Amino acid sequence: MSSRSTEISKLCRDCGTNSFVAEVCAACGSRRAVSHKELNTLSIAHVDCDAFYCSVEKRDNPAIRDKPVVVGGGRRGVVSAACYHARIFGVRSAMPMFQVMKLCPDIVVVKGSMEKYAYEGGRIREMMRALTPLVEPLSIDEAFLDLTGTERLHGRSPAQSLIKLQNDILREVGVTVSIGLSYNKFLAKTASDLDKPNGFAVLGRDDAQAFLSKQSVGFIYGIGPAFAAKLEKAGLRTIADVRKRSDKEMAQRFGDHGLRLARLARGEDHRRVNPVSDRKSVSAETTFNTDISNLEQLKDKLWQVCLKTADRSKAKNLAGRTVTLKLKTAQFKSITRRRTLQQPAQLADKIFSELEPLLEAEVDGRKSYRLIGAGISGLSAPVGDIADMLDVKSAKRGAAERASDIARAKFGSDAVTTGRGLRLRQAKLKNIAESLPRKPKFED
């Protein structure tokens, strides 16, 4: 860092300058600031979009901007995302919809559009990569960034670049993000949760230890209730308690998880920001409003989850050599069937064509199903669309799907659709028409 940047301890959250006079930024008049004595020396960040799916929906529909909103749907479905307003009522992600309605009967339920979220997430990802090539995505709406050495390139400290990024995302994409800045990934992610939404929090070497000492062991990401209970039984209730034990003792008592906990308790995390994703699979699933036993209806549902899986894999530029079919019976029995391919698949048409015979072999009309899912694993970069020698039309369908992706991203999910998709949309519209004038609370 330059000597100029080492003098910065307070930055304006609106313009990024250090021109504060009497708690007011002399450059822009803002009173919003981030201040920390190590602000200029830290370069590892965690950027997390705030209630991303809901934020995108509120951006696109101002009428619901001030209302509690969840993305999900179906009376037997679950919440994919909940806005901060909804969380006040106790609504959380993965919560069953029937429970959501009990907690907040007036909640707005939006089915959502994964291709829209993937598109907006991709825009944000490119804005991150304009700052540094060291961007490690964790999901569609969050990532680690390593901005070490970027000051000379941008003429700004890493903290100033992050403030600019935060404001650029709000202006260009219309959603807020929260940023954590520290000297390693664990503490950067910890910091990003401290000042949500639209926050900017810093944990440095001098204050991280004191901050962690006050926290319970369950505060550390990855420690679930079962492990936390096991630790408490051993007298380890706080991170300060963990620090009293040696690494050897923690490893002998709790294995690799104990050793990891001992190191994180001291604020130690030597993992690098890795731009290569370690994601193992990409998948999508849907829970039906009523159980289904009919094969053709199940195929329609299979196509929908294959399309979502393909959209997600395209957004991450991934393809998979193994395709997986997931079913759950009315009695909650899970069934998984897999097929390994010669070439990695990414297109919905290819994933569906491989899973369709697996579905046909499983469904006999006597059993009913409540859920279906599709996924790919054995991930790698796409190698291009490989034509199927036994299906001469597969290359044309692949080209058509690529073209429809562009149209759907630009004009919406209904801009281009397949024959199966069109039939599903017409059936949906018919169901809506038949339900009028009674206003439905949920979408199919």
Image: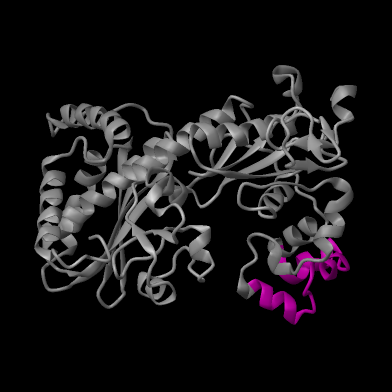
Would residue 368 be counted in the magenta stretch?
A: no
Q: Is residue 328 visible?
A: yes
Choose top left, top right, bottom left or bottom right for residue 298: bottom left
Relative side of 293 to 154, left or right: left
Q: Nearer the viewer, residue 196 or 417?
A: 196
Residue beneath the point at 13% across and 34% down: 390
Tell me the quarter of the image containing the C terminus: bottom left
Q: Residue at x 65, y 36 (%)?
A: 145
Q: How many marks?
A: 0
Q: Is residue 240 magenta?
A: yes
The percent coordinates of residue 229 (x first, y second) are 67, 78
Residue range corresponding to the magenta coloring: 227-255
Question: Would you say residue 320 is visible in this rendering?
Answer: no
Depth order, front residue of 236/424: 424
Q: Residue 91 location in percent, x, y?
A: 48, 68
Q: Answer with the quarter of the image where residue 75 lies.
A: bottom left
- Residue at 89% x, 30% y: name it: 7
